[in-house]
Image: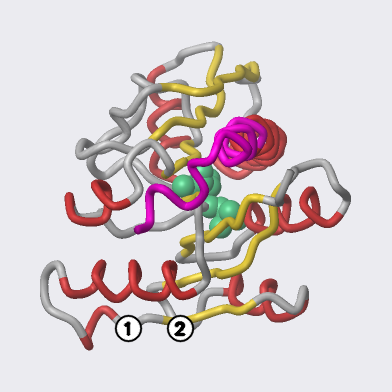
Amino acid sequence: MEEVRIGVLVSGGGTNLQALMDACMEGEIHGRVVLVISNRDDAYALERAADMGIRGQFVSPRDYRGEDYDRELIRLLREEKVQLVVLAGYLRVLTPLFIDEYRDRIINIHPSLIPAFCGKGFHGERVHRAVLESGVKQTGATVHLVDEGTDTGPILLQETVSVLEDDTVESLQKRVLKLEHRILVKAVGEMCLELGNENIGGNHEASID
Ligand code: GRF
């Protein structure tokens, strides 16, 4: 079974990306990260990719209008024959054009228990601040497929962590992030097995032609 070719979209620090690259290296995931694309040139995730010898590409939002940005992403992903796209802290909304191109092959990680604390405006620290302010005793992380909505696609995996009495935004974020790394690796691993099996069935790269 061939390794699934994975493309990762990022905007920031890239700890989820790192978890994925490590898991691929260690053979935990039957896939390989072949391309990392960032919409920010200062994303540390790009350095992480370079350190692992993986192609990292900054695509400037200033250089493209409307759907043309995603058209460029698709071009790059096709160039690397990417079969599965992972959004790992990618802070741009994908256009329907992109979602159609990789339908059911785009995975996102979100730092809460969807459908709670998600949707427009809920990203980064804001999620954890809202969790603390609400007084809920449990939060968590969710891996889901991406559709045209914001955090609305089918859920693949979800796990919880307790919110502690003395939690701060930082401590909670740190605990959830650890969980994100674990479930993202697990979900991508499962997806790669599925896609690998489809390929054996003769559907190789069906989605990108
Ligand atoms: C994570 O909390 C992820 O869920 C969210 O953005 C954060 C990115 O962290 N979408 P990192 O860049 O993977 O370290």
Q: Nearer the viewer, residue 58 or 205?
A: 205
Farthest residue to the right: give it: 26
Identify the disc placed on residue 60.
1
Relative to 196, say whether 91 is above or below: below
- Residue 125 is situated, as x and y percent measured from the top left of the image, at 46, 46
Q: Is residue 58 visible in the rendered structure shown here? A: yes
Q: Find disc 2 in the rendering and name its residue.
A: 41
Farthest residue to the bottom: give it: 63
**Main secondary structure of the magenta stretch:** helix
Could you tell me the amino acid type at mark 2? Answer: Asp
The C terminus, quarter of image: bottom left
- Residue 45 is situated, as x and y percent measured from the top left of the image, at 60, 70
Farthest residue to the left: give it: 66
Q: Which residues are magenta?
A: 193-209
The N terminus, quarter of image: top right
Residue 140, by quadrant, is top right
Asked if residue 139 lies left or right of residue 90, the reply is right
Mark 2 neighbour density, 10 Å: few (under 14) some (14–19) many (20 or more)? some
Proximity of marks 2 and 1: CB atoms separated by less than 8 Å:
yes
Please tell me which residue is depicted at 30% across the width and 59% down the height of the picture: 92
| Cα–Cα span, label 2 and label 1 | 8 Å
- Residue 161 is situated, as x and y percent measured from the top left of the image, at 64, 19
User: Is residue 3 a member of the stretch shown in magenta?
Assistant: no
- SS class of the residue under badge 1? loop
Relative to 144, say whether 87 is above or below: below
Mark 1 neighbour density, 10 Å: few (under 14) some (14–19) many (20 or more)? few
Of label 2 and label 1, which has the lower sequence position? 2
User: Is residue 205 a member of the stretch shown in magenta?
Assistant: yes
Q: Nearer the viewer, residue 113 or 134?
A: 113
